[in-house]
Amino acid sequence: MNRPASLTKGILYAFTANVIWGIVPIYWRLFPGISPLRILAFRILFSFLVVGIFLLARKDTAWIGIFKNAKKGGPVFLSALLISLNWGFYIWAVNSNHIIESSLGYYIQPVVYILLGLFFFRERLPPLQWTAFGFAATGVLLLTFFSGTFPWIALTLALTFSAYGLFKKSLTIDPLSALGAETFIVSPLAIVLLFLPIQGTIGESGLSPLVLLGLLPSGILTSLPLYCFAQGTKLLPLSAVGFMQFVSPTLLFLVGVFIFPEPFPVKNLMAFGFIWVSVILYSLSLFMPRERRRIEEPVSG
């Protein structure tokens, strides 16, 4: 595939993933009486079911071989743990009225991608991107000062998913096979969560057959954007992947403000303003000739 076509395809994949992630909180809020750990268990198992069906349909058994190769199996194991932690924490944040703070985490995430690309893939940054990083860091510090608490929810979401993206970038495995291996690895954890004495066990009030039926789409809503994200990550530089990540938190922010109105003090607009300025600066940097040439260079891995 020629480079411009590959770049366009990567952008479409990444954009699709982030649109789904931006609106999916509306779905998770349909299950307010169920423990986030229980929802996480069904999310993992139904995702493995969906991915398994696709792998069987194309008679793909390559994902099994991943476990025979330590160089591939290790990163896949770590990526599986990271994405599971991110999934569970995100469900808890959304259903605990922290959608706006979750959006902050995913605004910060591209900045984390910038640093990961810098240190692990030696992606050189122009001055405008360093300026964008400075504005984002200032926004986080202001939010910490205004709220009086460290934005740990935002940073946990940003760090876990950014680390997941780093491992995905380093893997030379078909995205669907990798996703099959990841969901298989954490399936035992999901089964354990199903039988833990926490709210939402089968037969308890709140987890009726109708609710179980409602949780079935979680497999598609989880596996489809992850597959698209993995494809986009393979086709784009890590910094360009970071740029596409701005779509998701913007939709999250709008959902948190207008659909599930959460408290948002006016003073916090200043902190978010710094984050939004960093988004604008980073976006502008991608239209600079030097940056465009760097994006169109072959992606390592």
Image (tube, rainbow, N blue to C red):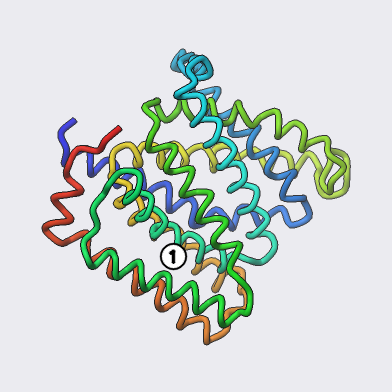
Quadrant assignment for the C terminus? top left
Local crowd size for mark 1, using a 10 Å CA cut-off: few (<14), some (14–19), many (≥20): many
Q: Residue at x 51, y 14 (%)?
A: 68
Question: In the picture provided, is 93 more to the left or to the right than 140?
Answer: right
Name the residue located 20 percent from the left edge and 48 percent from the top edge: 295
Rendered residue at 59%/58% (across/down): 26
| Residue 103 position in % (x across, y down) | 51, 64
Place of residue 93 in the rendered image (x, y in percent of width and height, measured from the top left): 64, 59
Residue 270 vs residue 155, the one in the foreground: 155
Eyeballing the image, is 12 above or below 139? above
In the displayed structure, 155 sits above or below 144; it is above
Q: Amino acid at mark 1?
A: Thr
Q: Percent position (x, y) of residue 275?
A: 41, 72
SS of the residue under disc 1: helix
Placement of the N terminus among the 4 image quadrants: top left
- The outermost residue toward the bottom is 266
Give whichever of 193, 171 is nearer the camera.
Answer: 171
Give the total of numbered labels.
1
Left or right, 49 with respect to 79, comes to right
Q: In the image, is residue 208 above or below residue 46?
A: below
Q: Nearer the viewer, residue 20 or 109?
A: 109
Position of residue 182 measured from the top left corner of the image (x, y, whole percent): 55, 30
Which residue is at 54% across, 43% downward?
Answer: 221
Q: Horizontally, is 27 left or right of 169 in the view?
A: right
Q: Quickly name the residue at label 1.
A: 250
Position of 273 relative to 177 (above/below): below
Residue 147 found in image quarter: bottom right
